[in-house]
């Protein structure tokens, strides 16, 4: 297990019921789309489902919508604590052998649960399975289909996850017993709790991929992620480095230390080009990591920095030689 990550412990208050699927819908101020999400969960062709709606301290009409369903859903109202805390509260209450997560603004197509349950029944060694998904607009109109395939082996999937998190939390179905081994979602992570969970599951178990799109992920103006892009990038890079160190200690990748550290340097260089400022904020984390494990990585980073400075000095020299006289002093001291 990843020993240095802070993870809530799973404490179940009820007995797990074989074959049941617990669909957990965490919601905070979600009155605009919640009813559509709940209706899609209740409309599953797989009938042995319970729908747990966790109201994470909403201040709008969310509570009234939940209560309008009566006994068809399991309501849970709690103080606001974020998506992870709401998911964890739902998992602790769940009675199902399988756990599904449905965001309050997303939708399940009717056969989603049936297809995934059948897949896990046929593949008993898998801890979970995930699918492609459809991206839709505020009105539910399809924009595109996202191909979520990562690779065939656990090592390939883990390496590709470092480059991009292709797995949608709502496209997953997870065996409940997995959480007994890997723990629940980290409540100290506000943006990347799903990304972190996929790493933790894959580090211990194989997961499967179904090339069908039976979930709709809605893109709209009020999504929380749009208000914290810089914070998300900072948290993501810290989480990636933390995860890499733990996976290295368990020798999951299978390569030499230097090869793997240099591979990570390449991955992080792609993040630098994409994120810029967020990568610079994480420089001190890279520099002060454990000496043996990150020695090759720091050397690569240092070479990259020196090369960048060399190019900048050359550009500045050329600008000085070509610039009109009134601009030379400004360039020289800028």
Image (tube, rainbow, N blue to C red):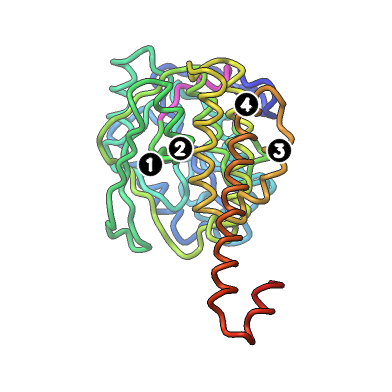
> Please, is residue 214 above or below residue 224 in the view?
above
Marks 1 and 3: CB-CB under 8 Å?
Answer: no
Q: Of tags 4 and 1, which is closer to the observer? A: 4
Question: What is the C-alpha distance between the residues marked 4 and 2?
Answer: 37 Å
Choose between 83 and 268: the one closer to the eye. 268
Mark 3 residue element: helix
In the rendered image, residue 156, in percent from the top left (x then y), is placed at 39, 25
Horizontal side of 33 relative to 248 (left or right) equals: left
* Label 3 sits on residue: 287
* Label 2 sits on residue: 51
Q: Of tags 4 and 2, which is closer to the observer? A: 4
Question: What is the C-alpha distance between the residues marked 4 and 3?
Answer: 13 Å
How crowded is the residue under tag 1: few (<14 C-alpha within 10 Å), some, or many (20+)? many
Image quarter of residue 227: bottom right
Q: What's the magenta region?
A: 173-184
Mark 1 residue element: helix
Question: What is the C-alpha distance between the residues marked 4 and 1?
Answer: 38 Å
Which of the numbered marks, if any, corresponds to residue 245? 4
Residue 92 seen: no
Point 58% across, 21% down: residue = 248
> Please, is residue 104 above or below residue 158 in the view?
below
Image quarter of residue 238: top right
Q: Quadrant of the C terminus?
A: bottom right
Marks 1 and 2: CB-CB under 8 Å?
Answer: yes
Q: Residue furthest bottom?
A: 326
């Amino acid at each position: 297990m990843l020993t240095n990550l802070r993870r809530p412990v799973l404490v179940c208050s009820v007995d797990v019921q074989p074959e049941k699927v617990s669909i957990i819908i965490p919601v905070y101020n979600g009155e605009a789309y919640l009813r559509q999400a709940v209706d899609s969960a209740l409309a599953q062709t797989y009938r042995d489902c319970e729908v747990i709606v966790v109201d994470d301290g909403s201040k709008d009409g969310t509570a009234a919508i939940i209560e309008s369903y009566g006994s068809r859903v399991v309501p849970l109202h709690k103080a606001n604590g974020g998506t992870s805390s709401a998911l964890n509260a739902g998992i602790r209450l769940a009675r199902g052998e399988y756990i599904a997560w449905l965001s309050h603004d997303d939708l399940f197509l009717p056969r989603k649960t049936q297809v995934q349950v059948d897949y896990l029944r046929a593949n008993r060694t898998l801890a979970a399975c995930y699918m492609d998904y459809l991206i839709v607009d505020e009105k539910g109109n399809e924009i595109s289909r996202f191909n979520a395939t990562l690779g065939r082996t656990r090592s390939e999937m883990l390496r590709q996850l470092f480059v991009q998190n292709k797995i949608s939390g709502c496209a997953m179905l997870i065996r409940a017993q997995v959480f007994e081994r890997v723990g629940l979602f980290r409540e100290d992570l506000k943006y990347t709790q799903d990304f972190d969970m996929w790493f933790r599951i894959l580090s211990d178990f194989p997961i499967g991929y179904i090339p069908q799109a039976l979930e709709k992920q809605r893109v709209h103006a009020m999504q929380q992620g749009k208000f914290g892009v810089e914070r998300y990038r900072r948290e993501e890079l810290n989480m990636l480095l933390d995860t890499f160190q733990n996976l290295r200690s368990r020798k999951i990748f299978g390569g030499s230390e230097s090869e793997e550290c240099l591979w990570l340097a390449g991955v992080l260089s792609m993040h630098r080009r994409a994120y810029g400022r967020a990568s610079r904020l994480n420089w001190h984390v890279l520099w002060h990591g454990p000496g043996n494990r990150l020695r090759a990585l720091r050397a690569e980073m240092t070479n990259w920095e020196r090369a960048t400075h060399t190019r900048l000095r050359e550009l500045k020299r050329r600008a000085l030689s070509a610039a009109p006289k009134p601009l030379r002093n400004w360039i020289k001291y800028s």
